Amino acid sequence: MHQVTVWLRPSEPVLLPFTYREELQGLVYRRLPEKLSRWLHDEGLPTQRGRFKPFVFSRLTGKLRPQPAFKALLATGPVAFHLASPLPEVAQGFAQGLLTQPRVRLHKARFTLEELTLSEVPLPQTPALLEARAPITVYRKENGQRRYYTPFEPEFAALVLENLRAKAQALNRETSGTLHLEPVGVTPRHKKIERFRRMIIEGWMGRYRLTAPPEILWVALTAGLGALGSQGFGYVEVVS
C-alpha cells in the first residue's frame, strides 16, 4: 500500500495556525518506526542534485474556517489529509503508528484518530488530468535567493518534469519517454503564498495535464510534483 487517508476529530473547536503543515510533517516523523523516520529525516534517496525524501502529503480538508485575525483555521469537526509514498513501508509504517498512538497533537490542538484507510496507487493512463491538493512549487537559486516560477512560464513545466525524472531515477523506475505538462484552467487566483519554518514559499493549485509513461505518472502520484514534497507541497490526484 502506498497511500494513507487520515481523518482526525478535534476534542473541541480548535485553532490551527496557517503554518500547520509543519505540524503535519512532524506528525509523520513521530509516527513512523524510529529507524525509518531517522533515515527519511537525515538521508532520503540520492539524486543528481542532492537528496529527496520519498513522501508527500496534502493540505487539510474538512470542517475548517479561516480566521485571518488569528492567522489560523478554526477546526469545528473532523479534518482529513492524505499521505503517499513510493515506498510501501512509509505509508504502512505511518498508518500503523497512528493506529498504535491515535491521540494526535498539532500545535496546541488535540485530535483523535477517527478513520484511516490504506490504499494502493494504480498505474494511471496517460495523459492524466491531475489536481493539486497541495501547492506545486518549483524554483531556481539566483544570487542566493529563490526565484519561483509560475505555470505561465516555460521554466515551470521544465523544472517540474526535470524534478520528476530525478525522482523516478532515484527510485530505479523507467525514465525514458516523452514528458509534457500543461496547466488546465489555471489562473492567477490559484497562486498560494505559504510559510514553512520562516521561509516564504510560492506555489500553485489547479489542474494540470501530464503526459508521461505510466511508471513516471505513478511517481508523480506517490512522490509529488515539484519541490518540497516532504514539506507538504506538490500532492496531486487523478481527476476522474
Image (cartoon, rainbow, N blue to C red):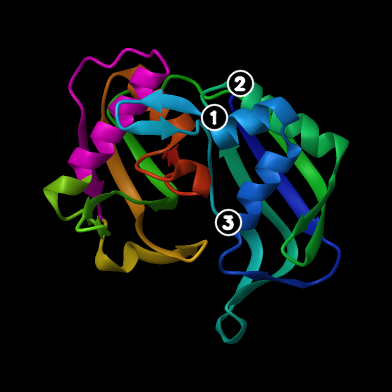
Report the span colored magenta. Answer: 157-185
Classify the position of the C terminus by image quarter.
Answer: top left
Q: Which residue is mark 1?
A: 85
Do labels 2 and 3 touch, CB within 8 Å? no
Rendering coords of residue 96 (x, y %): 78, 30
Give, as a three-letter code, the residue at label 3: Arg
Q: Secondary structure at mark 2?
A: helix
CA distance separating discs 3 and 1: 17 Å
User: What is the quadrant of residue 47 in the picture?
Assistant: top left
Circle 1 packing at 10 Å, graded few (<14), some (14-19), many (20+), is many
Circle 2 packing at 10 Å, graded few (<14), some (14-19), many (20+), is some
Q: Residue furthest front?
A: 144
Q: Is 165 covered by the magenta stretch?
A: yes
Rendering coords of residue 92 (x, y %): 69, 25
In the depicted view, which residue is nearer to us: 52 or 217?
52
Q: Which residue is mark 2?
A: 88
Give, as a three-letter code, the residue at label 2: Pro
* Residue located at (34% from left, 56% from top): 204
Do labels 2 and 1 touch, CB within 8 Å? yes
Indicate whether 97 appears above or below 108: above
